[in-house]
RNA sequence: GCCCCCAUCGUCUAGUGGCCCAGGACGGGGCCCUCUCAAGGCCCAAACAGCGGUUCGAGUCCGCUUGGGGGCACCA
């Protein structure tokens, strides 16, 4: 199996899913997972994207057995480093009568295309160089005349190619153009390079995007012209925008970004999603399991079954990403969550001590959807002081004066306790709720804002236990003062 | 315009001719739990695109229509 992206942009959901399925199939069958970089279009190659690709795979945990950076027995793994291989194979096809050198100028081709478009004919190559004398053509090519090598597509009959997910795909050969195999710069097009490499690298299953479906018969023809055995081919559908109408556009991507989502793997990492959740999410877009759809990578390997892949296009559903992310975070042990969220606190400029960090995990673990959600919930634990908004200290249906009184009474109770723990503080405070005839929400709410500085926080008494008596009293006193001033 | 592909709840899907008055998950609604926010538990609404065939029997097979998607480069 191989994952063969071109380094022309950022790594997105679609490529990640293809890579995942390649990985799953390889691990499931004991095969080899190869990373091959398809960088034959020097104009479109964007620097850094190869690195992002590798980083993305590493982050997702999709380790490849062979690739440009890890080596392997059938390298090189960058197509730009395999020039000669393609050239000799292109000429091999010429030799076999399945391809021909073409000397047509781009300008002439463009003119022909326009004319044929006007006549509403299909816009393929007009066959100008198809019937050149082979020896003569070879001589011109060897003499350095600018040329390409085109595939000599059959003029009659049909080609039948089998896609595992869709069955046989039959196309009349007249619809298959004389595609360029080798460009005039000596580099191959995808059609040649991918077929040659897949064969040379012993690829048994080709998983790729549906955008290749229309050139699929061509590819089958090329493989057959070489006399090679065809791999098993499957074409994965594209992802549609969340509405299900059309594919993701630049605008949709920006829109997703505004709501805290992204289709780029690198962004997902920055947004605090965990790889296990992302993986689970994309795995299920196009692969149906009947139940227990929460799976780790290892479990996916166990259950992966290509006969359950779906050929229909799938709409992206970001709320499901949230669900899987949160679910997978909750699957992690406390120590692991601590390890993963620590960088977010540090990045926020906070000083983190590991003891406290570990203690707060049980309080926030089921509240995290993304890892950086730890900040709104728990950043206050690591701050020396908090700044409650005065108006938030006033509980529902109560006046500032009443709240000040409650704060004072709470202070007295808490101060009288030997230490502030869940076991000691909660019963004492509940007793106060009882005697005042108010709701727990009102009184606990005042304390919550006083101690945490926010209206939403982890459970109150557990939090108090962690910050300690001294700080609790100090902050309640502070709140009392603020409330006094407002009466 | 031409070629190709696809079609089950809003979304991802289970379903491989009788086990389906269609199952699960996300999202939505309700109830319970509850110190906020979550998490959790229980419940509800929600689909076989349409029309023709084949068959004793069709979501499942075939055809057409409609809708959606992909491709038509010396890009991948």
Image (tube, rainbow, N blue to C red):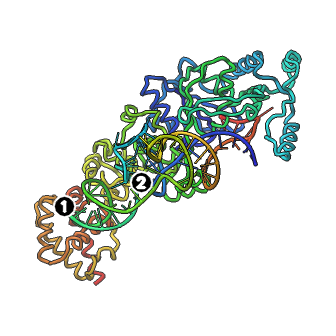
A414 sits to left or right of A233 = left
Describe residue A110's horizontal placement relative to residue A353 as left or right. Answer: right
Quadrant position of residue B47: bottom left
Q: Residue at x 57, y 24 (%)?
A: A231
The residues tagged by marks 1 and 2 sit, at their Cα atoms, a distance apart of 26 Å
Q: Are marks 1 and 2 in contact (CB under 8 Å)?
A: no
From this view, report whether residue A46 is shown above or below residue A446. above
B73 or A130, nearer to the observer: A130
Which label belongs to residue A348?
Answer: 2
Q: Residue at coordinates 20% horizontally, 57% vertically from top-left?
A: A465
Q: Secondary structure at mark 1?
A: helix
Name the residue that disc number 1 marks. A469
Tell whether A241 sits left or right of A278.
right
Question: Taking B54 as reference, is A77 above or below it?
Answer: above
A428 shown above or below A36: below
Closer to us: A309 or B75: A309
Q: Earlier in the sequence, mark 1 or mark 2?
A: 2
Q: Please tell me if label 1 and label 2 are on a single chain.
A: yes
Q: Can residue A298 be seen at all in this image of the molecule?
A: yes
Horizontal arrangement in the rendering, residue A192 relative to residue A10 (left or right): right
Label 2 sits on a secondary structure element that is loop
Residue A262: percent from left, percent from top: 52, 51
């Amino acid at each position: 199996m191989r994952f063969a992206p071109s380094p022309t942009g950022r790594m997105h959901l679609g490529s990640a899913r293809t890579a995942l399925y390649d990985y799953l199939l390889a691990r499931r069958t004991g095969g080899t997972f190869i990373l091959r970089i398809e960088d034959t279009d020097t104009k479109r190659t964007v620097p850094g994207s190869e690195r992002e690709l590798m980083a993305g795979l590493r982050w997702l945990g999709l380790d490849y057995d062979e690739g440009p950076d890890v080596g392997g027995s059938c390298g090189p793994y960058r197509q730009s480093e395999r020039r000669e291989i393609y050239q000799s194979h292109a000429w091999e096809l010429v030799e076999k009568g399945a391809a021909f050198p073409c000397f047509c100028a781009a300008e002439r081709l463009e003119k022909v295309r326009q004319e044929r478009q006007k006549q509403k004919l299909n816009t393929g190559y007009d066959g100008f160089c198809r019937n050149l004398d082979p020896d003569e053509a070879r001589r011109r090519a060897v003499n350095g005349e600018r040329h390409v090598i085109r595939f000599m597509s059959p003029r009659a009959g049909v080609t039948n190619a089998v896609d595992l997910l869709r069955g046989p795909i039959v196309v009349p050969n007249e619809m298959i153009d004389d595609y360029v195999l080798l460009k005039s710069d000596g580099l191959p097009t995808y059609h040649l390079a991918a077929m040659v490499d897949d064969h040379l690298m012993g690829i048994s299953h080709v998983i790729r995007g549906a955008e290749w479906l229309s050139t699929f018969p061509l590819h089958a023809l090329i493989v057959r012209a070489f006399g090679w055995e065809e791999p098993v081919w499957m074409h994965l559908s594209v992802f549609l925008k969340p509405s299900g109408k059309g594919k993701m556009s630049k605008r949709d991507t920006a829109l997703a970004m505004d709501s805290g989502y992204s289709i780029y793997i690198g962004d997902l990492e920055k947004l605090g999603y965990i790889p296990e959740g992302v993986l689970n999410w994309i795995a299920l877009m196009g692969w149906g399991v009947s139940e227990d759809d929460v799976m780790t990578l290892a479990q996916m390997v166990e259950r992966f079954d290509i006969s359950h892949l779906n050929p229909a296009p799938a709409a992206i559903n970001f709320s499901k990403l949230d669900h899987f992310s949160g679910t997978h975070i909750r699957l992690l042990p406390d120590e692991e969550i601590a390890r993963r969220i620590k960088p977010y606190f540090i990045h926020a400029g906070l000083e983190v001590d590991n003891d406290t960090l570990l203690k707060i995990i049980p309080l926030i673990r089921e509240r995290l959807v993304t890892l950086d959600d730890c900040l709104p919930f728990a950043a206050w634990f690591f701050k020396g002081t908090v700044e409650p908004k005065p108006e938030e200290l006033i509980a529902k249906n109560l006046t500032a004066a009443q709240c000040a009184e409650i704060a004072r009474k709470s202070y007295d109770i808490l101060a009288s306790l030997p230490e502030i723990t869940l076991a000691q503080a909660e019963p004492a405070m509940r007793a106060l709720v009882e005697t005042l005839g108010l709701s727990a929400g009102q009184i606990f709410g005042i304390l919550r804002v006083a101690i945490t500085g926010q209206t939403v926080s982890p459970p109150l008494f557990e939090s108090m236990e962690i910050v300690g008596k001294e700080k609790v009293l100090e902050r309640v006193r502070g709140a009392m003062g603020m409330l006094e001033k407002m009466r």
